[in-house]
Amino acid sequence: MALPRSRNLFHRRLHWLPALICLGLLTSCGNGGGAGSSKGTNGNTGTTGTLLVQLSDATADQVAALTLTFSSLTLTSQSGSTVTVFSAPVTVEITRLAGTSTPLAIVTNIPQGTYSQMSLILGSPALTLISPTSGQPSHPNLPAGPFTVSPTLNPALTISSTPMVLTVDVNTAASLTSDSLGNISFSPSVNVVTAALPAAGLNPFNGQLEHVVGLVTAVASSSFTISLRFGDQSLAFNVDSNTKFTGIGGLSQLSAGQLAVVDGSLQSNGSFLAGSVKASAVPLFGFHTQGLLTARIPAPAAAATSFQMAARELTGGSVQGNFLGNGLNVDVLNSAYAVNQVGIDLTGLPFTPTFDATTIVPGQAVEATSTGQLLPATTTFTGVGAFPPALVFGEVSTPEVDLQQQPLSGTVSNLTATNFTLTVAGDSVFSTLTGATSVVVYVQPSTQVLGITLSNGASVTVRGLLFKDSSTYRLVAARVVPKV
């Protein structure tokens, strides 16, 4: 991995987001952990307010996965009182979050006032690299921590009757360094961004929730609750007449134990409203996974019978947090293929966006639900992107493979009103897996361009759906933000 020696990668502040507070790199202290979970999502009243804490990432192009456990977050007011936002460990793979976010906690009864200090405890970093020379994934050893980051919030965070969103943005590139011998170290670089819930113009940094995956635990007359990841967090969503359901006819057909993929938003009363819900059954001992496709059998052009992925998200079954970033073999001999079009406009394009057994390729972000329990890995993958057997945690089959949004970073050229060429780093994971150094990016009328005016030479991170069209990689963008 081409990490800089004795210095950090790309450490720049996110000026394009509001109220940025750059948190410096701090040494570890104390023990993480604790009891409890994310608060409920009932509306607030009286002298309390709502705070949604989101997690995002400014990723490094050369990193295939970085998993962190966030143990606790506390706020200290200007008067010296403290509020525990969460104290139960939450384990998340973060590289998939560039250009978007995922909820860490929702607190609807935080006392109104001004908060000037924050303490975040995180640790257990697990890193997955793919060598640009050998093409083989590896897991370098990193210090376990815990690491405590305790910044002064300047400007201070003010909690009032208007819900606030606090985004914890981990700068993966700036958190990793290597010495002259190639030893990699981790020291967390984190930015904190605060924003009030707007009346319009939602995005993942001010109240929009994208692709939240969980198992349904409860269903009421106009709401439902899901358990995220490894059961370390629960979120409740209201529905209304505008909520779109896929896989079921409506809320009355949603039941405990089903998998739900939810896109929604924070409301002014502190609740979450589901805009779309995709529901499906999960077989006994089955689980859901999302990740980066690294290798396939046979090679592209012929129809795929199986592929290998770096797992970036796992929900349900007997899967564990330490599986994240490791390889998973997926049998797709009898699988259907679909594209997750939520938030993406695929109309009016100069090519036909196709995702099937022939066009599925390494470098794409994919999602699948297993047909049963995790089995020992028996399929052998070789070549670029193939995980060593010791780093493969199992094998499953799936009835359907879904193409998902993913981030890519690079430099803009050949800019027109509707598209541009994105040139990526030659040692990036994408380039290593595909052999390509450029992608044609399509900017649709619905594409969010945040904090930047597109121009040739600009460094950007784009997030969207990636397609292989003959010999050309094409990405239809949901969002474009400055590269950090």
Image (cartoon, rainbow, N blue to C red):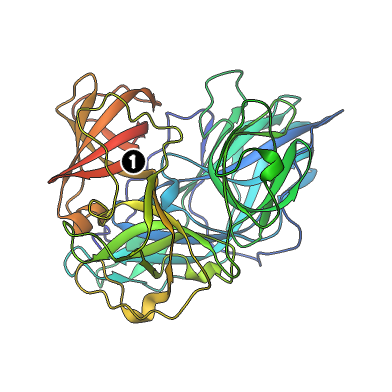
Query: At which x and y percent is residue 449?
Result: 37, 25
Could you tell whether 121 is left or right of 47 in the image? left
Q: Residues within 10 Å of mark 1 (few under 14, many from 20)?
A: many
The residue at the point 19 percent across, 55 percent down is 434
**Label 1, on which residue?**
465
Q: Position of residue 102 (x, y in %)?
A: 54, 45
Q: Position of residue 148 (x, y in %)?
A: 59, 58
Q: Is residue 342 above or below residue 147?
A: above
**Which quarter of the rendered picture does the N terminus lie within?**
bottom left
Residue 6 appears in view: no
Find residue 215 and report its image quarter: bottom right
Q: Residue at x 34, y 25 (%)?
A: 452
- Helix, strand or loop at mark 1: strand
Taking the image as shown, residue 449 lies to the left or right of residue 296, namely right
Q: Nearer the viewer, residue 213 or 90?
A: 213
| Residue ID at (18%, 26%) | 456
Q: Position of residue 413 (x, y in %)?
A: 16, 30
Q: Can see residue 150?
A: yes
